[in-house]
Image (spheres, grey):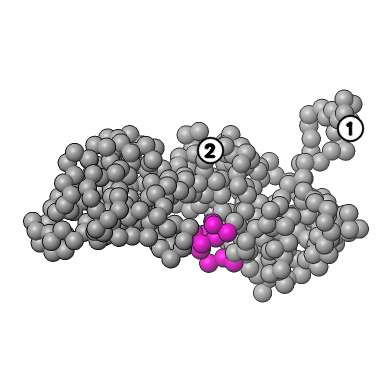
Amino acid sequence: MSDSTLVLLAAGSSSRFDMGVKKQWLRINHKPLWQFVADTFSQTQRFDKIIIVASKEDIAFMQNYADYEFVQGGVTRQQSLKNALHLVNTPYVLVSDVARSCITDGLLERIFKEKENYDSVVPFLKVTDTIVYDDKTIDRDKVKRIQTPQLSKTDILKAALTTEEEFTDESSAIVAYGGSRAYVTGDEDAHKITYIHDLNKLPCLQGPSSDTLSGNGFDVHAFDDEGIMYLGGIKIDVPYSFKAHSDGDVALHSLIDALLGAAGMGDIGMLFPDNDDAYKGIDSKELLRRVVRILTNYGFIIINVDITIAAQKPRLNQYKEKMKKVIAEILGIDKARVNVKATTTEKLGFIGRSEGVAVISNANLKYFNWKKN
């Protein structure tokens, strides 16, 4: 059994990345970045366990990909780390950022070589440019660019973080606590992803797979004798509606399931439970907008969708173009890539008896191609 635990910090919102996609969800072939980094560390066989710190909404989706241990992040990096440290019971803990993706065996070897001699071990790079601070040129030989991962003695790090003072890295907290710090030579390839152009500095990362991801969705709603009918995102001029917890837009519900299916993200009931009053009577267009934002954050691009509405009534020919326009605007794609079909069941079954409507949808996604930016 190893005497070290790895903590990977991946709870950031990527606010400075400015691409809509969370950087931890950029794809390396099919793997999201956080998994690629975790798997790379795992292959070194240096760790008793790997803990990944992520936002609450990300954890459920991350668990579809890998069996690492996950913990919810905090408001700050330091709070996120403290949350993870509750699960660390090895003498040493290595802390790294998922955004620092290209960590070599050589760098890890230099770090672990010093673990018994110091309370913390940090990689650093020398500064070669002239450094001016407060309008004064300072000795650049006294300046270090500190990197992660950083190795710490677990008990010392836990004690050092009991303070309310915020530190930007683990070694600074340990030094402030009175502990010792060793510096080892860092690695230029261990560059941290902060902005989109940083991706060009990381030779270890290949681009995303070009595969198409397909999903389908199916939904049914019975008619209600009163209310307003919404179908395909528009109001239908009939004196009846659908029985439903939300506005009952069976077409958009089916489409949402198709999109979530293509992304491997479960179904509409998992995201928007029908026993939650927050969604009572809600406009299904808003639910679709939320799903599109989620897909974007997680690195998916919508290619096209195809919707088939099976209804004996109402007649929908006059509404199909309006549906396509509304759906295309929400999905952020050309109207030509939204197909809406309407058919009857030749008076067979519950649909043929005019008791309700069924809709089947198909959606195709691809990964956001960060290599093109």
Mark 1 surroundings: few (<14), some (14-19) or many (≥20) residues within 10 A: few
Residue 371 falls left or right of residue 360: right
Mark 2 surroundings: few (<14), some (14-19) or many (≥20) residues within 10 A: some
Residue at image point 43% right, 62% down: 273
Q: Amino acid at mark 1?
A: Asp
Q: First in sequence, mark 1 or 2: give its number.
A: 2
Query: Residue 171: x and y, percent?
Result: 81, 53
Residue at image point 22% right, 56% down: 357
Residue at image point 33% right, 47% down: 364
Q: What residue is pinned by disc 1?
A: 139
Q: What residue is pinned by disc 2?
A: 19
**What span is in magenta?**
56-69
Q: Tell me which corner region of the image, top left, top right, bottom left or bottom right, holds residue 253.
A: bottom left
Query: Residue 323: x and y, percent?
Result: 28, 41
Query: Residue 276: x and y, percent?
Result: 46, 63
Quadrant including the N terminus = bottom right
